[in-house]
Amino acid sequence: MAQFFQFKERDTNFKQETIAGLTTFLALAYILVVNPIVLGEAGMDKGAVFTATALTIIFGTLMIGISANYPIGIAPSMGLNAFFTYGVVQSLGVDWEVALTGVLIAAILFMILSLLKIREKIINAIPQDLKHAVAGGIGFFIAFIGLKNAGIVVGSEATFVSLGDLTAPSTLLALFAFIITIIMLVYGWRGAIFYGIILATITGMFVGIINKPEQIVGSVPSIEPTLFVAIQPENLLQALSPEVIPVIFTFLFVAFFDTAGTLIAIASQAGLMKDNEVPNAGRALLSDSAASTVGALLGTSTTASMVESSAGIGAGGRTGFTSVILSGMFALALFFSPLLEIIPASVTAPALIIVGAMMATEVKQVNWDQIELAIPSFITIIMMPLTFSVATGIALGFILYPITMIASKRGKDIHPLMYVLFVLFIVYFWVNA
């Protein structure tokens, strides 16, 4: 085992890797709580999503650990699950079954592109500023959703949105969870989001806002309500409609850059970079796309290599054995589903706000001093929360980009693929007008 995972070469050992795996689990465990609640609001069975989430994490994390020897956890992306529910199902009116098929198609495309090694060419075609704008915009989008779920931001006929009733019990509980999580994050506590959810849940039970669980350990919830729904013929046909194709592109687009950014960051932190390149990048990308494919078949949204993996690396994780330990912990967690039933959306809302804030830091990478780049980036970012649609923000930004670049006499800097996307997004708006 030590030889297979290269313990000696990477200056690590069994104990160090085990501690790292447990540390990453604490940092990632909140996903088992948040993902079923978010996708549950799309109409999906929460128990089935819980099981699908755990199984997908186990599969993807084992694959990247064993095949690529990376100490990384793969799990459903907290940005893309929110986009799935609020941007696709609730905003566009797409059935969750069809949206899940869209996730599957995007995952298969991602896998094909990874196998053919042309992924980098597609990424390079899209300007760096728009990449950062998309990531930052999704951060604002899911933070807005978290504020809404917490009752901190509510609808208003006079001003569209307004401050909610901060004295409402559920909102007070959300504020408590938010503040306590921030304090733990500032102190550098690993697993702060998970601890925040647990502390808020216990507090909610103590003051009578949340019902106490009838049991803690139980049987694994049935996955039948979501299993293989994504490959039903009627859903496949609807997923290829003009309305859903941009959604598939968004799943694919964000999964591309989520994974690439995390891999670079994690490899650098763990000291695995060689000649400014990420070793075994192809295997890592294939693991991610395979996990998304399996996840869609089981019943969960698009996966990503999780930045929370840095917690385990900070604890000494250097090899894929960290991921093996992490997978084992999620396998044990399958039997704690009864706890899920008592946790309300108001308690998990702070996790969305905080993850959104972390993603929003990407906007600092945009060249704001160049107006031809700043305007398309700004429109991409601001239109995601204002239209309640990630796809709309991307479409508008990608339409504006060629216009501002040509106007600034920088047309030669535009990749031909951007002109193709320009036309496709105009057609998208025309068809859906």
Image (tube, rainbow, N blue to C red):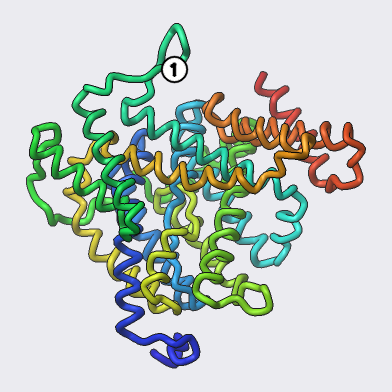
At which x and y percent is residue 373?
A: 75, 39
At which x and y percent is residue 220?
A: 22, 56
Rendered residue at 17%/49% (across/down):
338
Rendered residue at 51%/67% (across/down):
266
Rendered residue at 50%/26% (across/down):
91
Q: Is residue 335 left or right of residue 297?
A: left
Quadrant location of the N terminus in the rendered image: bottom left
Residue 413 can be seen in this image: yes
Residue at mark 1: 161
- Of 99 and 27, the residue lying toward us: 27
Element at label 1: strand
- Of 132 and 290, the residue lying toward us: 132
The quadrant where residue 65 appears: bottom left
Q: Is residue 408 left or right of residue 10?
A: right
Quadrant location of the C terminus in the rendered image: top right
Residue 216 lies, with reference to residue 147, above or below; the image says: below
**Amino acid on which disc 1 is placed:** Val
At which x and y percent is residue 132?
A: 63, 46
- Of 216 and 408, the residue lying toward us: 408
Residue 48 can be seen in this image: no
At which x and y percent is residue 177?
A: 26, 41
Question: Which class describes the residues within 10 Å of circle 1: few (<14), some (14-19), or many (20+)?
Answer: few
Q: Give the total number of marks visible in the rendering.
A: 1
- Of 218 and 182, the residue lying toward us: 182
Q: Is residue 243 left or right of residue 368?
A: left
Rendered residue at 61%/57% (across/down):
110
